[in-house]
């Protein structure tokens, strides 16, 4: 296998540190997501085998799908079979094989892994090492399990944890920055990876909007990402209202048509999808099988996006979340098809390699920089030397996301930050030749290009068509910021928190459905104790109460 120049330089530096300098048995590879850390580490292992320095390799990775990919790449590079193991496997030293496992399995396998390292000269490769916090179970388990490992390769693209905790085997200064020995570290920043062509640059689209929440027939509250909403004093007694009138919470609130079932195409999420789909259309001119990824904060929101995208696109996306049986097979099916969209809840992040992903709609649960960088790593992978596309992320216009995006952009060179030009040619997925953008059939082989109407939005002032990502009309300059209407019930519903209880959507719906009936029955009873209890518990919580009493 031909290594990229950085991978070759990394391997040479690692072997020099481990075999010649021998100051420390740990070597840190801090390289941008998507740059190719897996192949670099496998190549180091292959050389250590050929030099007679090790007998076995143990790989620890974030999740099962990534573990499987490690086993595949390891065999390609080293020619050796790697066995996936879990804590139910017990004694694994007798397997006499290289093994790989998830971080979650370390505690259950701690003694077995220790025994492997005791019996054999072992190289341990820890992928996404930020999981191994010093004060946490995974870090403590890894520290004990690999105490006798001969060598350790630490891999990361996001070395600083969101909680500020230190990871095992790494040195930090007083500001929490890593201070590993220079000779024992190989660093490749995201900006360097972009300039060298190993990763694609990213364009961030700040998706703005204004929510108008109707509190009653005559009172509305406008919510934007720029300021705190003003709430009329007569409504301030409503539990959780201040928390509900938060731009990001509203951005994650599914919007429906009047029937309460059909996703609203003109809602905030619909506008995000329309913007991202228009960009995906453009990218597919050059990468015919390019895909889009939606990262949703909950299963409920993900299922909503599936219905929404199907309504907008006419094609049902692939859905993947932890509540499904064998979710990895859905990721693999998407990876190996040309379907346009994948919708995920916490399943397509660190280490998941789908090179054709180019566009993202980002509405996550975690708002941290680490999660942000890991997510963006899914849309920067290159498909080859001729791939000059960019990643494109549609992100809510929040200051926290702006900060994360600015940090990433600051790492890129001015050339990489320059927006890409609109393509004038499109590539045929059948023969690979190029035709003019407006062609209906391939000029070389006759392939019929799928017809897609232009995705434009009309200016409310002059009626001129504009690209969905435009913030101002290209004809008259009028603002194109959209206003999205919600009711008080809808605003409170999403992630409602009442009296310290985090309520699930089904509980909120149940509470609302039973509210009028319960109120009438309690008031009619004349029982003052029940009336007092009724007034102390907001209707949103009654579904939780009914569930508790039922059990």
Image (cartoon, rainbow, N blue to C red):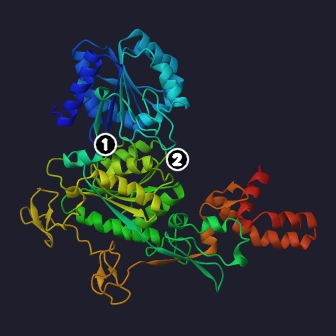
Q: Position of residue 203 (x, y in %)?
A: 30, 60
Count of numbered circles on the image: 2
What is the number of the mark on residue 323? 2
Which tag is nearer the camera, tag 1 or tag 2? 1
Q: Horizontal placement of 72 versus 160: left or right?
A: left
Is 199 located above or below residue 16 in the figure?
below
Q: Position of residue 390 (x, y in %)?
A: 25, 57
Q: What element carries label 2?
A: loop
Which comes sooner in the sequence, label 1 or label 2? Answer: 1
- Distance Cα–Cα, label 1 vs label 2: 30 Å
Q: Position of residue 189 (x, y in %)?
A: 29, 43
Is 547 located above or below residue 163 in the figure?
below
Q: Horizontal placement of 260 versus 203: left or right?
A: right
Foreground pick, 305 / 353:
353
What is the number of the mark on residue 32? 1
Q: Residue most toward the left?
A: 444
């Amino acid at each position: 296998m031909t290594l990229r120049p950085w991978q070759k330089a990394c391997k040479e530096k690692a072997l020099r540190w481990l075999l010649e300098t021998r100051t420390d048995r740990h070597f840190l590879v801090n390289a941008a997501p998507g740059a190719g850390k897996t192949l670099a580490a496998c190549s180091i292992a292959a050389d250590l085998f050929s030099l007679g320095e090790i007998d076995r390799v143990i790989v620890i990775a974030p999740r099962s799908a990534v573990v499987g990919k490690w086993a595949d790449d390891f065999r390609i590079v080293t020619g050796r079979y790697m066995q996936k193991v879990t804590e139910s496997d017990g004694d694994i030293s007798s397997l006499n094989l290289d093994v790989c496992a998830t971080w979650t399995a370390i505690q259950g396998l701690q003694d077995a892994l220790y025994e492997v390292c005791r019996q054999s000269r072992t190289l341990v490769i820890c992928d996404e090492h930020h999981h191994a916090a010093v004060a946490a179970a995974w870090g403590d388990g890894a520290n004990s399990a690999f105490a006798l490992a001969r060598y350790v390769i630490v891999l990361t693209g996001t070395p600083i944890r969101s909680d500020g905790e230190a990871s095992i085997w790494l040195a930090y200064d007083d500001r929490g920055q890593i201070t590993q020995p220079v000779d024992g570290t190989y660093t490749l920043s995201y900006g360097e990876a972009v300039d060298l062509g190993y990763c694609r640059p990213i364009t961030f689209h700040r998706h703005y909007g204004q929510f108008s929440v109707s509190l009653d027939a005559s009172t509305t509250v406008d919510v934007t990402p720029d300021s705190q909403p003003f709430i009329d004093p007569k409504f301030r007694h409503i539990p959780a209202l201040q928390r509900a009138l938060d731009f990001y919470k509203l951005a994650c609130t599914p919007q429906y048509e009047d029937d309460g079932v059909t996703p609203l195409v003109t809602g905030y999420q619909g506008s995000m999808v329309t913007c991202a789909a228009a960009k995906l259309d453009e990218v597919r001119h050059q990468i015919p099988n390019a895909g889009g990824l939606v990262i949703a904060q909950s299963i409920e929101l993900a299922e909503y996006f599936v219905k929404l995208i199907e309504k907008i696109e006419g094609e049902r996306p692939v859905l993947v979340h932890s509540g499904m049986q064998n979710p990895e097979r859905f990721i693999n099916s998407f990876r190996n098809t040309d379907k346009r969209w994948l919708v995920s809840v916490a399943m397509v992040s660190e280490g998941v390699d789908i090179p054709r992903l180019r566009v993202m709609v980002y509405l996550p649960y975690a708002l941290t920089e680490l999660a942000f960088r890991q997510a963006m790593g899914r849309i920067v992978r290159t498909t080859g030397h001729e791939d000059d596309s960019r990643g494109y992320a549609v992100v809510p216009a929040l200051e926290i996301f702006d900060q994360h995006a600015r940090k990433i952009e600051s790492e890129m060179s001015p050339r990489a930050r320059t927006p890409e030009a609109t393509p004038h040619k499109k590539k045929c997925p059948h023969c690979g030749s190029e035709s003019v953008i407006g062609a209906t059939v391939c000029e070389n082989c006759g392939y019929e290009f799928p017809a897609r109407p232009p995705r434009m939005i009309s200016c409310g002032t002059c009626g001129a068509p504009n690209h969905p990502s435009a913030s101002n009309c290209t004809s008259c300059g009028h603002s194109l910021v959209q206003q999205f209407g919600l009711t008080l019930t809808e605003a409170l519903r999403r992630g409602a928190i009442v009296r310290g209880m985090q309520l699930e959507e089904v509980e909120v719906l149940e509470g609302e459905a039973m509210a009028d009936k319960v109120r009438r029955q309690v008031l009619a009873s004349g029982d003052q104790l029940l009336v007092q209890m009724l007034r102390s518990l907001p209707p949103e919580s009654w579904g939780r109460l009914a569930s508790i009493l039922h059990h």
